Image (cartoon, helix red, strand yellow):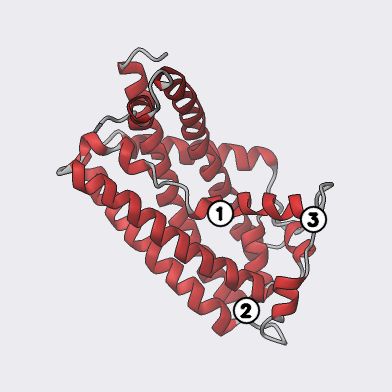
């Protein structure tokens, strides 16, 4: 099953008898749509973070929509070039990027609680766990379930090893191992980061309504001294560039596989 379009092929093989084509069709198209929109989505967030950093350094500067758009296009172009390089070069870039992501995440999880300028330093557990801030028109129960969509980024990407299986050595062991490690590390570290944010944020409305246009940057400024916030924002920008490039690789390989298999 080591194919770049692995998910739809695996769905066809593993589905109950008679349901293979339908499972492959649903999996293939939903996955392709998700892949080709993921990279621009990540790059858009990255562009917003970069311009937010510029706005923090120069309070008179307010990013415009066309500036965010053009910077997003430029980042997508750079990621396209990187994703078209030889496999060994991409592997090196990806290894460094993945390692940096983990290190930066650990730094953020440790630094934010240690350096927070809030007084009191942390919100009470009653506020974190006992209060539901429902900003939707749905009942609280539905809103709580919808809130889990907001942290899907901590688990996304576990299917990428499947899409890249054709390009890795020892794929029958390396790909499943990468899937398990991505899910485990992403889920655990993402959970820790969510806890840190929940216990240190003081004004959610201010974070979401900030003129910076980027909630993570607004949160860091609300919680940390400005130099520390800028340092963590810089780490996040580097991580975001690596993440967007990884999404672009996955999307390009899925599109290639679907074209090769006449799915289009």
Q: Nearer the viewer, residue 260 or 19?
A: 19
Q: Is residue 88 visible?
A: no
Q: CA distance from mark 1 to mark 2?
A: 19 Å
Counting labels gives: 3
Q: Which residue is mark 3?
A: 140
**Residue 219 appears left or right of 159:** right
**Dot 3 and dot 2 residues touching (CB under 8 Å):** no
Q: Which residue is mark 1?
A: 50
Q: Nearer the viewer, mark 3 or mark 2?
A: 3
Q: Which residue is mark 2?
A: 225
- The residue carrying pointer 2 sits among few (fewer than 14), some (14 to 19) or many (20 or more) residues within 10 Å by Cα, namely some
Q: Residue 182, how many percent across, how many down?
A: 37, 54
The residue positioned 43% from the left and 71% from the top of the image is: 106
In the rendered view, tell whether residue 36 sits above or below residue 213. above
The residue positioned 36% from the left and 24% from the top of the image is: 12
Q: Is residue 52 visible?
A: yes
The circle on residue 75 is none
Q: Nearer the viewer, residue 205 or 152?
A: 152
Tell me the quarter of the image containing the C terminus: top left
Q: Earlier in the sequence, mark 3 or mark 2?
A: 3
């Amino acid at each position: 099953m080591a194919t770049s379009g692995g998910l739809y092929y695996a769905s066809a093989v593993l589905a109950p008898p008679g349901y293979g084509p339908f499972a492959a069709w649903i999996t293939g198209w939903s996955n392709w749509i998700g892949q080709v929109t993921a990279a621009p989505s990540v790059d858009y967030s990255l562009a917003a973070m970069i311009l937010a950093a510029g706005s923090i350094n120069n309070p008179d500067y307010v990013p415009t929509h066309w500036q965010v758009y053009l910077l997003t296009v430029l980042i997508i172009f750079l990621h396209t070039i990187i994703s078209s390089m030889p496999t060994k070069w991409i592997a090196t870039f990806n290894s460094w990027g993945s390692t940096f992501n983990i290190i930066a995440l650990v730094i953020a999880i440790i630094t934010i609680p240690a350096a927070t300028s809030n007084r009191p330093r942390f919100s009470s557990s009653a506020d974190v766990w006992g209060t539901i801030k429902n900003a939707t028109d749905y009942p609280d129960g539905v809103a709580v379930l919808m809130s889990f969509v907001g942290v899907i980024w901590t688990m996304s990407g576990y299917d990428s090893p499947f899409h890249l299986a054709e390009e890795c050595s020892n794929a029958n062991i390396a790909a499943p191992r990468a899937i398990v490690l991505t899910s485990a590390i992403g889920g655990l570290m993402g959970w820790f980061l969510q806890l840190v944010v929940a216990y240190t944020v003081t004004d959610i409305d201010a974070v979401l309504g900030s003129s910076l246009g980027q909630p993570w940057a607004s949160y860091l400024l609300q919680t940390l001294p400005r130099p520390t916030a800028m340092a963590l924002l810089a780490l996040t920008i580097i991580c975001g560039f690596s993440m967007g490039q990884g999404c672009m690789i996955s999307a390009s390989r899925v599109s290639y596989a679907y074209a090769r298999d006449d799915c289009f």
